[in-house]
Amino acid sequence: MKHLLLLATLFLLVSPCRAQKKNGGKLLQVKVVDTPVIDWISYPKDTANVVGTNTQTATVMIRSRLPLSVVEIKINGITTDVYVEKDFSAPVAVNQYEQLVERTITLRTGANTLVIIAKNTQGIYKESTRKVIVDPNQISVLRSSKDNNPPMIYVSEPSNIREDHVVLYEDLIKLTGTVIDESGIQLLKVNGLTVTTRENGAFTIFLPLVVGENPITIEAKDLNQNISLRKFVIDRKNSDGSVYNFANAKNYLLMIGIDQYQSWPALNNAVSDIESIKEVLVKSYRFEPADVITLVNEGATRTNIYATLRGLIEKISSQDNLLIYFSGHGYFDKLLNEGYWVPVDAPSGSDVSGYIPNSQILKIIENINSQHTFLVADACFSGSLFSTATRGYSDHVEKYKSRWGLASGRLEVVSDGVQGTNSPFAQGFMEFLKYNKDEKVAASDLIQFVKKKVTEANQQTPMGSPLKGVGDEGGEFIFYKRN
């Protein structure tokens, strides 16, 4: 009997939260009821805690005899952080949990309310509140000569600012962003107007736009009087009441392919490449045969190519899209740092007078008033067409004008492929279009696929990006599949 009593006592000692006792022949669960304890390390006063800077470090220690399930931080009624079971530390001893929570927070000038809510696995929770007042009169005390870092300004909308310039068609812009500084923000202005920042440094202001250029200046000053400026220009275009609608747009296609040169070596697959790609685009995507122009071999003279490109300036409207695909020889003049398309009647050698320079192609594209223009060049040394700028994909890119290009290689010789097939570049281009299952795909998706596909199997590196200085406004060409 003594041994049984000893075993029962040991069981109670090592497992108090799931102990059992005998009652009328039944074993009952006995739960230990526990409420978490919250100790404030920062802001120890139950009354108001006065500080002099907007950026603070909130630190609390939470103790519990049961595992914690959730810890939530609220600032001025807004939940800023939520920690769950996977975030918590292991117990420091049997049924003894201690969790240190430390978080950098941003407070508004004046009164602030901080709330910590801790809940354990039984669903029992504890809520603890502190009042924190950011007093501007304390700011001078906190100034430091060692702080020489100005605030950091980030603009999230408009999202497609490139080289400090963005084109919009609205008459009212919602400008949003974030301003961050280690010592706290004292003042934020947008075009001279004082703007209130939220606890996390976020700000929003609505600005009317006039047709033409609208300079924007964002000025942020921290508590140590360090100032930073963010300047850019919003160019508001008058869309004369029309909004781009892909359903009403025409997709023009100009295909140029040359195998049989008069003075240059013959190629194997340039013509078959453009015919195969044209077939995919007309059959599976929204390109109509009536809007396709094809120049091959003897028809792809310098005069014909140039005249056809010029003719597109008058033919294409602001509601239309254009895809140009050139497959043939290319040439690069190191002395002039200029790349060229080689037409069928071009002389061989370094006499570039019969070639078509990239700068001339870009000049024509700049004057074609399309919504989207996508230039694809499967030719040697075609990489000189491109800008060094890059950007990520953003939503609604279709509503912004775009001028993008895709080249089969950088400043390098590229493969024509085995006769009777297609070039490696054309194969990758067609494979993406043929096996795409999405209703619509952006040019950047096609570019990434082709770059990976061709580079893995060949000693050439395709490249694609916005074209240099021809009116790209941050959009992208979108390929729509037929219904």
Image (cartoon, rainbow, N blue to C red):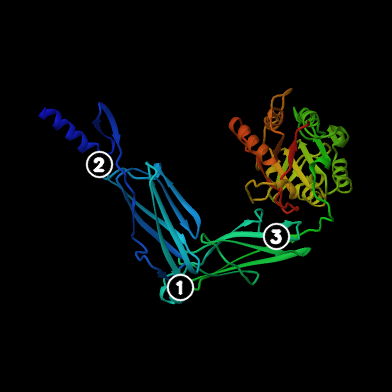
* Cα gap from disc 1 to disc 3, whole angstroms: 33 Å
Q: Earlier in the sequence, mark 1 or mark 2?
A: 2
Q: Where is residue 265 drawn, in percent x and y? A: 76, 32
Of marks 3 and 2, the one in the foreground: 2
- Say what secondary structure mark 3 lies in: strand
**Which disc number belongs to residue 94?**
2
Q: Quadrant of the rendered structure where residue 340 is?
A: top right
- Say what secondary structure mark 1 lies in: loop
**Residue 329 shows up from this direction:** no
Query: What residue does disc 1 label?
Result: 135
Q: Residue furthest top?
A: 420
Q: Quadrant of the C terminus?
A: top right
**Which disc number belongs to residue 220?**
none
Q: Amino acid at mark 2?
A: Val
Q: Where is residue 180 drawn, in percent x and y? A: 51, 62
Disc 1: CA contacts within 10 A as few (<14), some (14-19) or many (>=20): some
**Residue 234 shows up from this direction:** yes
Query: What residue does disc 3 label?
Result: 173
Residue 140 lies, with reference to residue 111, above or below; the image says: below
Q: Earlier in the sequence, mark 3 or mark 2?
A: 2
Of marks 1 and 2, the one in the foreground: 2
Residue 367 lies, with reference to residue 277, above or below; the image says: below
Q: Quadrant of the N terminus?
A: top left
Q: Quadrant of the rendered structure where residue 255 is?
A: top right
Q: Residue furthest left?
A: 2
With 220 as the anchor, is 62 left or right in this view? Answer: left
68 or 88, which lies in front? 68
